[in-house]
Each structure stands twice: as structure tokens, then as C-alpha cells.
Image (cartoon, rainbow, N blue to C red):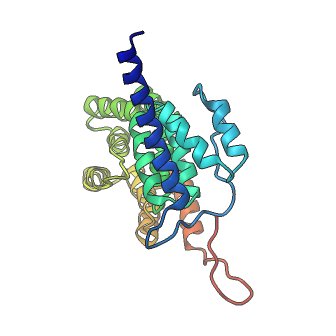
Amino acid sequence: MTSKKSVLIAAVLLAVAAAAGVVLITLATRQTPTQPEPIAGKPPIPTRLVTPAAAQIRAAYKTWPKGTLEKMLLLSRQYQGDPEVQFTFGVALLWGGYGNEAGATLERAKKLGRDTQIEVNADSLLHPNYFPGDPPFRPATADKLLTQGALLQAQGKRHSAAAIWSKAAAAEPTNPDAQVAAAIGLWDKDNITPAFSHLGPLTKKFPQSQAVRFYIGLLLVWTGQRDPAIAQFKKAVALGPKTDLGTQSQAFVTKLSAPAPTTQAGTTTTGS
């Protein structure tokens, strides 16, 4: 190796080390109008990690909070294209009270983990005002395409599921279940309008479809709209109280209509 190349490599290594040092110092001495507010308890870690850095991630989390952020920062730089590393770093940042940094890191994990459970999990943390995960679609009949899409969705492959459901909807324009599935495939916590916009008109196109009413109610539940959700579930029950969807709808009505639990002092508490 020539001396010129050696100098160049040394300069690059110094630059990388300096950049990492700046971030580490920022995390350690950050002075902003509002200081970091850590989340109580130990941050969760996925039970199954397939990344080559799995052992290092578990070791970093094991000592929480001592040294965890610093170790995860270094891992995030070493595995910049690894969605699991980026996701677990984002979780650590979030639990450490660094919300803005966590958001940016989770967005990166979401992009890198497209069409995997990492994308779904990152989305849940990025949108805490919505119910975690994606609203599940379960076909009422043994339709091959709809079932295939449901299985893909259950594996976290939301885009693959959406493609299958879109194909089913195009092939069966008069099948309300297929049209509902296509609407669920449009679900996006960054923009919930397309899913609702696709479902809404189906109430007129398929006025006797329980699935349409049930899944509108489910999306309303997912977005925290309690009263409108109850109204939709009641309409689903009216279309057939003894069917599977009718039974599920009634269960939602009962659960959502129940008064919130209160403490002895009379203050309302939130359930898990």
C-alpha cells in the first residue's frame, strides 16, 4: 500500500470516528429546550432476530440503559442497510427519550424493512395514536386469492397482500369481500384516507354486505373513533346477528359500549 493511500484511508477513518463521536457526545450532553423524557421500563426487543448483529443487539439491550444507546449507535452505523438493526436502534432511542431521533431512525427502518413485519412494527411506533399493527382481513369464504392475501398480511407482508387483494377485486367486481379486501390493502397509517374512501361507497354498492359494515367499523376502531365504530358494528349485527361477523360485531359493540373502569377515587383509568 502506498503512503498516499495510507494517508487517505487514515483520514477517512478519522472522519468516521469523529462523526460517531459527535453523535455520542450529542446523546450524552444534549441540551435542548426540553430534556429527554425516557419511557419507564426496559425497551422491548423482537423475540426473533435474523440479522447478523442479533447477538450484539441482545448484549446492548441486556445492560439497559447503561451503554445501550452508544452500542446501538455504533451498530446502526456498521449495519446501515439492516432493517432490524435500525429498528432496534429506533426503539432504544424512543425509550431513551430521544423522540425526534427515534422517529427518523424508525422511518429508515420502515423503508429498509418494506413488506416485512419490521415495517409494520415501525409504523406502530411512528403512529402511537392508532391501534398497533394493521387491521386484519379474514375472508368469510374459502376464496383462494383472499385467503392467500390474508396469510401474507399475517406475516407482515402488507404490500404483497395488497397486490393479491387488488387482483382479486379486479377479477370479482361483484364480490363484496374482494372489494373490502382491496380497501384494507390500501391501509396506510401515513394516509388513512384511501382505505376509507374505497370502503365508504361500498355501503351503497353492497347494502346487504356485513363485511362492508364490519370492516368500516374495524378501521374506525383502529383510528380511535369509538362512537362511529359502534354505529357501524350495530349495522353489521342487524344484517345477521348469528353469523361469524355478526357475532364479532356484537362483541365489539359490547366492549366499546362498556364504561371505562374507574379507581376507588372515581378517576377514570385506561386499560391496556
Nearer to the camera, 32 or 124: 32
Across and down, in percent, residue 43 comes to 64, 52
Residue 103 in view (yes/no): yes
Left or right of 243 in this view: 178: left
Quarter of the image that includes the C terminus: bottom right
Q: Residue furthest front?
A: 3
> What count of labels does the image hold?
0
Nearer the observer, 247 or 271: 271
Q: Residue furthest bottom?
A: 265
The percent coordinates of residue 108 (x first, y second) are 40, 41
Q: Which residue is drawn at the image coordinates 48% and 51% (left, top)?
A: 124
Given residues 241 and 221, the one toward you in this image is 221
Residue placed farthest to the top in the image?
1
Residue appearing at x 52%, y 33% in the figure: 155
Quarter of the N terminus within the rendering: top left
Side of 201 relative to 62 (left or right) = left
- From this view, report whether residue 266 is shown above or below residue 99: below
Say which quarter of the image contains residue 158: top left
Spot occupied by residue 92 in the image (x, y as percentages of width and height): 58, 50
Q: Is residue 133 visible?
A: no
User: Residue at image x 49%, y 62%?
Assistant: 30
State the residue at coordinates (65%, 86%). Answer: 267
Looking at the picture, how far across and down is residue 14, in whole percent?
44, 34
